[in-house]
Amino acid sequence: MTENAGKAAGAAAKEKFHVNQVDVEGIVTKVWDRDRDVFARLAVYDEQAEVLEQANGKQLPRRQAHYVTLQFLGGKTGDGTPVSLSEKDHVRVSGYLRDAAYSESLREFLRKARLIKRIEDGDDDVRVGRVATYVVAKTLIRFSR
């Protein structure tokens, strides 16, 4: 093994990587609470997203957002700081992914999907298994407007 290869192998061995680490930045579109937790819906924009309006003058092109739900356990960040968010806040968070399994009636699912015409008698008795994925936020940076 050459000296440079040995140094490279040693550097790679010291590297720390956590497979469930998430860093995301975007615009808050909705904030709500459930139990003691605070949730926020985040619109995330990237250069690969579909262009809805071409750039004109000094403005960037308007793109289709991707959405992610943030969860602040106990309404606080990982260091215990209480969270206060508003719509249109520009934020960056770090955290990890968490799935939450739940079920709801077919009627409720169709109502949320705005497919009211497809609801039939007995849909309250049919359960639909669902999974919600959240970014459990440990750190929060709010940028000035």
Image: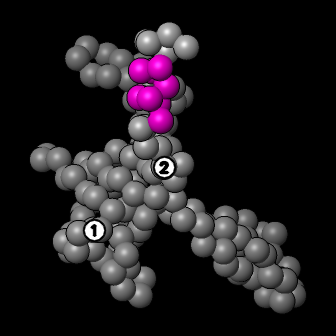
| Residue 70 in sight | no
Q: Secondary structure at mark 2?
A: loop
> What's the residue type where badge 1 is placed?
Thr
**Image-based side of 126 in relation to 112, left or right:** right
Disc 2: which residue? 18
Majority secondary structure of the magenta segment? helix
In percent of width and height, residue 116 lies at 72, 71
Is 7 within the magenta? yes
Quarter of the image for residue 10 reads top left
Tell me the colour scheme of the image.
one colour
Identify the residue shown where x is 36% and y is 18%.
Answer: 55
Location of residue 51 with respect to 126 vertically, above or below: above
Q: Residue at the left extreme?
A: 144
Which region is colored magenta? 6-13
Q: Is residue 56 left or right of residue 14?
A: left
Residue 139 counted in the magenta span:
no
Residue type (three-letter) at the residue carrying disc 2: His
